Structures are given as C-alpha cells and as structure tokens.
Amino acid sequence: MKSKIVAAIVAVLALTSGVQAAPLNGLQPGDLFALQYAADPQIRADGRQVAYVRIGYDRMTDRARRFIWLVDTASGEQQPLAAGGSPRWSPAGDRLAFVAPDETGHPQLWVRWLASGAQAKLADLPSAPGGLAWSPDGKRIAFSMLVEDPPIKLGAALPRPEGAKWAEPLQVIAQLHYRQDGEGYLKAGHEQVFVMAADGGAPRQLTSGPFDAGEVTWGPDGRTLVFASGREKDAEHDPLASRIWSLDIGSGDLTPLTSLHGPSGEPAVSPDGRLIAWVGFEDQVKGYQNTQLWVMNRDGSGLRSLTAGFDRSLSHPRWAGDGKSIFVAYGDHGVTKVGRVDLAGHLETIAQNLGGSEPDRPYNGGSYSVSAAGWAAFTLGGSDHPADLGLARAGEVKRLTDLNGDLFADRILAKVEPLAVSSSADQRPIDAWIMTPPAFDPSRKYPLILEIHGGPFAAYGPSFASELQLYAAAGYVVVYANPRGSTSYGEAFADLIDKNYPSQDYDDLMSVVDAAVGKGFVDPGALYVTGGSGGGLLTAWIVGKTGRFRAAAAQKPVIDWTSEVLTVDVYSFMAKYWFGKMPWEDPDFYWRRSPLSLVGNVTTPTLVMVGEEDHRTPPSEAEQFFQALQLRSVPTVLVRVPGASHEGLADRPSQEAAEASAILAWFGRYRANSAP
C-alpha cells in the first residue's frame, strides 16, 4: 500500500499543467531563491540610519539567511553589518545589540561597536535571548530567555552497562502546552526576565516561577522594568489572561499595574516616565476582539482606553519623543498602516501598505520603529514587490531600498487589481483582488484559481505573493478575498463567524468567484480552488457543498474539529474561544462545522497537502480527508512535505516551488478543453 501511495504522489509531481508561460513572462520557480525582503527595521534615535534585517535564500542549503544592513536615510546608501537578527540601537546610537548564532550554532547576544566595527558575544547563554532592550544610560541590556524546569522522572532506570547502546530515556510530559508549531516538542520551562552589562558579564535572572514574561521596556530612571505576564493561578488554562507588571531591579519586587480580565501586552513607558501605554481588551470570550490602545499613570491609576471608538485592532505602541502621542500599527481593509494617536484619542495615519513577512502569500502585516523626532522606518509593501524599507517623515514617504529591482527588471509580473463583490448571503461588500497573467489578453478565456486565506482571523491584501505569482505565470487568473471573519474590517465583521465557522463565508467566496467570472475573461468551466490552514478547511468545505470546481487542493486543512481541538498545539484557546464548549460537551456542534461531515457529497478531485512537522493542523487531519476520499473512490492524492511545519510549509524555496508545481500539475490533470 505504501509503495502505491508513493508512486501516486510521484506521478502527480511528474504531470504538467498544460499551460506554458512565455520565457521570462512572470515569476519563475527558480526565482524563489533570488527573492529578498526587509524585516524588523530599527531607526536610530537621531533618524540618520536604519538597521534592518535583509532576508534572502541560500541555494545550496535551501534555507533563509538573515543579515543586518544599515541604511543612511538621507542618501539611501547601504552597507552590510553582521549576520543575525533582532537589531536594537543603544540610546546614544553608537552600538547595536543583536542575536546571532555563535560557532556552535546556538543563538547568542552580541553587541557591535559602530565606530570600530568590533563586535563581541556578551555571554554563553543556554537558550536564545529575545526582546532585547537597552537601559536608558546604555550600560545594561534586558532580555527574556527560557529557563528549563527540572525533568520529571517516573520510576528508576536500569543500570546501563558501560559502552551499551540502549534506547533513549523516557520523556515525561506534564504541561498542557507541550508542543509548538515550528518548534516541535517543547522543553519544559518558562520565559524569564534577565539583565546584564552591555559590555559582557554574567546575566542576572530577575523573575522566576511557572509564568512566562513578555517583552520588557525600561523606565527612564533605569531602576525599573515593565513587562506583560500571565501570573494568575492556573494561567496555562487561561492563555489570554495577562497583566502589566512593574519590576524593581534592585529588590526584585513585582507590582501588578493592570487588572483587566483579558490580555494586556506590549507596554511602553512615556519619555518622562509618567505614563504607560499598552494594548489589550476586556475578554468577552469571542472568536475575535479588537485590541485597544490604553494609557495609565505610572502606578496603574488613571486607566483609560484611547481607542474604544476606533473599530480596528491596534498593536506595537511606540511613544513619540515629546510624549504627547503614541504611534501604533493597525490593519484596515487588508492594508497595514502606521498611525499616531494623541492623548485625546485622535488618530492620524502616518504610513500605509506595510509589507508582510510572508512573501509567499498576500497577508497583511509588517513592522516599524520611530525615532525621537517622530520619523517612522517601516517595511514598505506592494503587490509588485516583497517588503522593502520605507521612511515616513514630515508627511512624506520615501522608499529606501529596491531589493528585487534587478530580478524584476527581467520579469513581467501578474497585475493585481481590486475586485468589487457583494455577498449573495446578505449583499454585504466583500473585499477581493484579481490577478491577471502576464501577457494578459482580455478577449481570451482563462482558467481561474480561487485562493483562500487561513486564520480564519487574518486578512489578505494588495501585497506581493510569490506562490500566487507562480500560479498566474502558469496562465491562470487568480482571485483572493477577505470573506466574513477576516480582520481589518472591524470587530463585528470578524465575529460573523464567532461559534459559526465555516458558514456564510462560503457564500462570500462563491460570490467572489461569480464576480470574477462576470469579468468576461474567466472560463466558468475551468474553476479551481485551493488554500492553506483555514483556507484548506474552506477548500474541503467547498468541495462538500458544490461540484462547480474541476479540481481542488486542500493544504494543511482542518477536517474534523473534534480531533483538531484535541491534537492542535493551542488546545485551550481554540476550544474556549472558537467553540465555547469542549468536544465532549456538544459533539454535534463540532461535527456540523467539520468538513468530514460533508465528505459523502464530494465528487471533486482533491489533492491534500500537509507538512510532516505540522503541529497546528496535524498530519492526521489531512490523512483523514485523504483516506475518506480514497474510500469513496474520489480522485485524490496525499502530498506530505518532509520536515515542514504549519507556518513553515513554504519556508524553503525548493519546497515552495515543488508545492506550487504539484498543485498546478493536479489542476492540469483536470483542465477544461476550452482553456487556453
């Protein structure tokens, strides 16, 4: 049986789609190794330089490589600095702390002196440091790091003869959250706060106990740290509960500053130390809830939300240098923006179209930082390029990099345009985008691929997407959308699928297809559908509801909500917030939302794909669907991606190329005769 399955997968991978792209006409699979994009821009306090992480790919190792570059904001001149990530400027701008592997391959904390070019590893840390933060005087660096718990032992091991090769010892797991997608099985322990001298020495642990600490920020006096942590009893079963805490570095005393029932995070202390800004919400136990911007006095009094009337989620608060306003990031209609909120709650947009950190899909996202003078460095996105580096200053936006200019000079990319859609369910407007192939001829009829985003509480937008560009280069029109449940449209729109997923999001997506067909250049007899994660779930749901698609590819799908909730890496969150009950409390409710309940209706040939190390929608989900389709004699193949996690399904360029090729090959097997 195993050999037959392998042979079937190999046969699918060997197929051709039947759609030939002209030379250099569109993104080519080999181009995936040449793509570069910007991440984590950090502007110096005086605004004259930006340190950012340039991410590219090594063709020989088939993996991403990260290098820190410096950009002069006046001239745009760039220079490489060091391998690594997480660059953070010292207050005086004379040094840069960052994280990079040492000669053993373990991530360590480094500091680079800009004037001399010298750099040093500050200590041999047992775990990777995160959340680097310089003290106001530049003499210390605070960070968080995993501190492992002592292993749990049950029983006694037999004495092993010298030189004997025995099996590895038993591993005993006692924590609820014991594995994480992208990391695998976790070491038992918790993220604790540390501080150490900026010129090296022994790190000092400041927190302890069975609680995780979030990113820290310093008070301007240099004597206190402020951070978020869920330190309530049984915090493991209440994953969103957290408070803002103040830590006295000298005594180690901890003081809670907030008491909201819900998440409180990303604290930022004002330049004069009087106020603390942070983001969070009062938990209403809904699938989606807007994260508001809050401020309070330094002692936790005077708590108030600045954005209770603003129907968007806010994140990454950063104080302006004068302490009179706070910069934030937020999503709006699929586009990530940077705004400035004054202390009266008025919001002004500073920059928009931040580039996401996943160039394979058009998710909104991005990152930014601000200088003391209020200049914002940010990842600048676009539908025709991955994230570059942008600078917003005095109302103007300047593009500082063009990382893929040489590559794209020899490529004609698919054009991305908005598509107007009204849902057949309730005439609600649905944002959508349509991609037309290179050398597009509107007088011809093209096959169409509906691409569905995951989440489900996420959003696509007019951003670069390498895998969708590969689909378009193969001769397909590609359409994608933000159906109900998507973020960046307000809390009510997202919560239309609260305890109700999937539901009328299906109608939204069918209306998107209808609108694309209505353009006149799409062949209604050559429709295909794919998506990953939540998009894989909806793909499986769609083929159980309709036979209008010639073929489908369900990537890393959820198939049975009961088995998903009990095998996913975020157990308590999904059951509590997406269903409100455990599977054994209402099994029928779980079943009605499971694509497996519709498998008896499926006639559409469906490829099923999943990463072998996926801990978010484990391989058992994909295997259930594949096996059910096999038992019903519906054409299907199972594609397993070796070593790939859920979020990292397309992290390696060779795998992204192979995955796109397999999907196009599967669709090509079921091409309509009328397609070009």
Image (tube, rainbow, N blue to C red):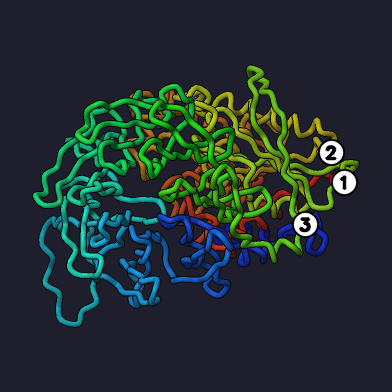
Secondary structure under tag 2 reads loop
Q: Residues within 10 Å of mark 3 (few under 14, many from 20)?
A: some
Say which residue appears at 16% left-offset and 53% top-offset.
206
Say which residue appears at 10% left-offset and 62% top-offset.
156
Q: Position of residue 191 (x, y in %)?
A: 25, 52
Most extreme residue toward the top is 426
Give the Cα separation between the discs numbered 1 and 2. Answer: 8 Å
- The residue at which mark 1 appears reads as 441
Secondary structure under tag 3 reads loop
Of the numbered discs in the image, which one, if any, rests on residue 412? 3
* Frontmost residue, 424 versus 598: 424
Say which residue appears at 52% left-offset and 55% top-offset.
649
Q: Earlier in the sequence, mark 3 or mark 2?
A: 3
Residue 131 seen:
yes
Q: Earlier in the sequence, mark 1 or mark 2?
A: 1
- The residue at which mark 2 appears reads as 521
**Residue 261 falls in which quadrant of the image?**
top left
User: For this view, does 247 lie left or right of residue 614?
Assistant: left
User: For this view, does 200 lie left or right of residue 44?
Assistant: left
Amino acid type of the residue that numbered disc 1 sits on in the rendered structure: Asp
Give the Cα separation between the discs numbered 3 and 1. Answer: 14 Å
Q: Position of residue 82 (x, y in %)?
A: 44, 71
Specify the quadrant that holds the N terminus: bottom right
